[in-house]
Image: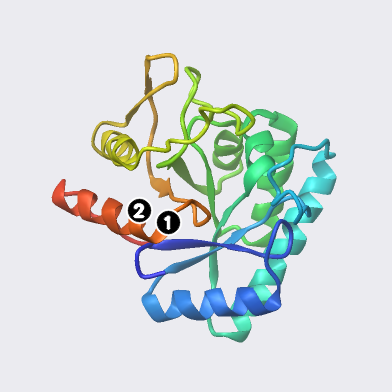
Amino acid sequence: MQLVTSANIACGGHAGDAVTMRAAVTSALLHGVAVGAHPGFPDKEGFGRRERFVEPRDAAAMVTTQVRALQEVASANCARVGHVKLHGALYNQASWDAALATSIAAAVRAIDPGLVLFALAGSRLLAAGRSLGLRVASEVFADRTYRGDGSLTPRSQGNALVADEDAAVEQVLGLARNGTVRSIDGGTVALEADTICIHGDGPHPVDFALRLRAALAAAGVEVRRM
C-alpha cells in the first residue's frame, strides 16, 4: 500500500467483502493513500474480466450498490471514498459503449458529485464524465499493451500484457514525460496521463511497484495522491 498513492478497492463484485474492504481502507489511511471504489461485474470465478451484455440502467445500479458498500465501510473507519475506477470487462465495455458510459457516469454523479471518475485515456467513459461535470482522471496502464486507436489490447490476445518489466517501466516513463505510447502495430499513440494503473495480481507486483517508483523518481516525476 505504501507504494501507491491511490488504491482501487474491490467492493463485492469481482472480489472483495466487508472484511477485505475494511482491511484495505485501514491500510490506505495508515499510509496516506486515497481510497477509491473498484466496482465490476459480479463474477468472482472470472474475476470480472469476462465480457457480458448488460443494460445501462443495470450497470448503473451495480456500480451504485458497490460504491455505496465501500462508502459505508469507509465512513465507519473515518475515511472517505474519493474516486471510482471500474474493473475489468465493465471498464472496457464502458470505454467504447456511449450509452453504458453515460449511465455509469450519471450514477457516479448521483452517488457523490465530488467523486473523481478514473477512466481510460480517450474513452467514451472519460468523455461522459466530463460532459456531466465530474472531475475525471485520464488513466494509462503500466502493464497493458495498446492498439493503434488508443484502446487496450483485449486480454483474449496473447500480446495483451507487457510481460517484460524493462519494457513496462519504459512505457510508463514515456507516458509520464511525453504523453505517448507505442502501439502493438508499431505506431505512436498520444494519451493524456493523469494516473497510472498498476495491477496487484501480476507475478511480482510489489517488486514491480518498487522498481517503477524508483524509475519515476530518478526521472524527476513526482507521484502524489489524487
Residue 226 visible at all: no
Q: Residue at x 42, y 56 (%)?
A: 205
On the image, the x and y values in percent for residue 216 come to 23, 49
The kind of secondary structure element at disc 1 is helix
Residue appearing at x 73%, y 37% in the figure: 100
Badge count: 2
Amino acid beneath label 1: Pro
> Which residue does the image show at 74% across and 32% down from the upper left?
99
Image height of 203 relative to 144, above or below: below
Left or right, residue 77 beside residue 67: left
Q: Are marks 1 and 2 in contact (CB under 8 Å)?
A: yes
Judge from the rendering whether residue 42 lies leftward or rightward of residue 76; answer left or right: right
* Residue 171 image offset from top left, x and y in percent: 32, 35
Up/down of 149 relative to 200, above or below: above
Vertical side of 186 occupied by 213: above or below? below
Q: Quadrant of residue 9?
A: bottom right
Residue where numbered disc 1 is placed: 205
Please name the residue that numbered disc 2 is placed on.
208
Q: Position of residue 1 (x, y in %)?
A: 42, 69
- What amino acid type is highlighted by mark number 2? Phe
The numbered disc on residue 79 is none
